[in-house]
Image (spheres, rainbow, N blue to C red):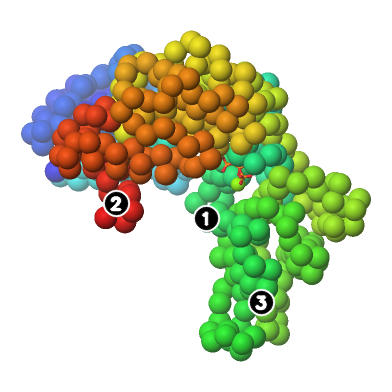
Amino acid sequence: MTRGSLLLVDDEEKILKTLGRALRGEGHEVTEASSGRMAQRLLGDRSFDVMVIDNVMPELSGLDLIRELLAAAPEGDRPQIIMMTAHATIESAIEAVKLRVLFDYLQKPFEVEELLVTVARALDHQQLRTQHRYLLSERDEEFNHYGLVGRSRAMQEVIRKAELVAQSKSTVLITGETGTGKEMVARAIHSRSAQRDMPLIKVNCAAIPETLLESELFGHVRGAFTGATSNKRGKFALADGGSIFLDEIGTMSPALQAKLLRVLQEREFEPLGAERSQTVDVRVIAATNRDLNEMVTKGQFQQDLYYRLNVIPIHIPALRERRDDIPVLIEHFLRKHQQRCGKLIDGIADDVMKRLSSYDWPGNVRELENTIERAVVLSTGAMIAGDVVSVLGAAPATAPAVLPALNLHRNIEWVELETVRTALERAGGVKKDAAELMGISQRALSYYLNKHRTSLT
Ligand SMILES: Nc1ncnc2c1ncn2[C@@H]1O[C@H](COP(=O)(O)OP(=O)(O)OP(=O)(O)O)[C@@H](O)[C@H]1O
Ligand SMILES: [Mg+2]
């Protein structure tokens, strides 16, 4: 049985004593208050799980006290409230339960057993509420932790806009060079919206062959084309009630552009081969690294569609146009990747920081993140030094001693794989020694071994 901290409020000494004893007998921790004012003082000092309160008391009635409590404490900090009420005031108690101000009420006279059962239920309820709040705050934490980072004025503006449009259902068009964080902003908008519990469905228009994209977006019925052996729901139908993220919208063919325009205008579409149209309630978030305005001028993108998409434009500037963000992003990625590979790194050497801050980052934040991840993986000291940091514009002064020289054109996966392979080779296959060579924990090495299992065997 759940035990908890209770505040028992009644102006009659005898009732306080009797009920207090019964509740303590169940293992609860009980504090007694003989007036509304006294209860108020106690509530100001500490929190309780459940408050059991008499309604009719001189000076400050139970309902008055509850009213003050509602005004003072945010919902999460309030105890569950059970009111003891006589027949004359039962109406207001019922009303308060309906408004969820009261957890429940007990009509006098009641059996002590009734009180014990109601208190137990209130405690269970309170516990669930606490757990729920914890989960929610954990989710927020995660969002902040791996969420949008940036202190430049440009990025603050992007974040502010994203928060604002999250509250609406308007179509959003996110523009920016590759790797600037367009997808992250789209996710941030969805996760802050009223539809956050519904899906965010992503479609990369550039990655799907044109002939398949239509069926991917709108679905098809059986027999719609050769190979359509069963009905298939499209991404729009799957996103119903939530959001759809149309990435690389600039690559869409004119025919599909027309179909998409119709969804945006009428909120309906037909699956391929279907006779009837379907309606959807979806927020559209589109992204592109192309200049759609220019494409409109050149006749490559439909003007009406552009206007429909561009209701709320969010432009993310290139990283080289907001250099203030570079140090905070570096710090953020250092922390993230240290955690991933179980290393402790104090920071980055000054000269390296200078180099990274003045580099142009053509691949924007993605390139910066990959560079930091690589540096963390390869680093063997407490500080990240120049030999493990390589960007296209500035080659490393010397190749790292133990580890393979970096090929700048290959990606981080390759670097990881090569690092692990070389370390294992030098350690004669002894994992403990290989981990030591790499300067990482054995657990971290297992993580990498597992990740590259197929390539390593
Ligand atoms: N402001 C930011 N804060 C933290 N991480 C970021 C930020 N911007 C981008 N990133 C990281 O950079 C990487 C690239 O971001 P994202 O995929 O959102 O970019 P994109 O603009 O969609 O790129 P592309 O045009 O290539 O699709 C991701 O790993 C993301 O986590
Ligand atoms: Mg993207």
- Please identify the quadrant where the C terminus is shown: bottom left
Q: Which of marks 3 and 1 is nearer the N terminus?
A: 1
- Residue underneath mark 3: 271
- Location of mark 1 (residue): 198
Asked if residue 207 can be seen in this view, the reply is yes
- In the image, residue 110 above or below residue 319: below
**Residue 84: percent from the left, percent from the top?**
30, 36
Quarter of the picture holding the N terminus: top left
Q: How far apart, in angstroms, are the residues tagged by discs 3 and 1?
A: 22 Å
Q: In this view, does 175 lie to the left or right of 147?
A: right
Q: Which of 201 and 327 is in front in this view?
A: 327
Which one is earlier in the sequence, the residue at label 2 or at label 1? 1
Q: Residues within 10 Å of mark 1 (few under 14, many from 20)?
A: some
Eye-nearest disc, 3 or 1: 3
Q: Residues within 10 Å of mark 3 (few under 14, many from 20)?
A: many
Q: Could you say which quadrant of the image residue 228 lies in?
A: bottom right
Q: Which mark is residue 456?
A: 2
Comparing labels 2 and 3, the label whose residue is closer to the camera: 2
Query: Is the C-beta of the residue carrying label 2 under 8 Å from the nearest atom of ligand 1?
Result: no
Say which residue appears at 62% left-offset and 18% top-offset: 358
Q: Distance between the residues labelled 2 and 3?
A: 44 Å
Disc 1 is placed on an element classified as: loop
In the image, taking residue 133 as reference, residue 114 lies left or right, namely left
> Does the residue tagged 3 have its C-beta within 8 Å of any atom of ligand 2?
no
Cα separation between marks 2 and 1:
39 Å
Q: Which of 301 and 149 is in front in this view?
A: 301
Q: Which of marks 2 and 3 is nearer the N terminus?
A: 3
Q: Is residue 245 above or below residue 107?
A: below
Task: Give the residue type that dot 2 points to.
Answer: Leu
Tell me the residue at 75%/46% (across/down): 290
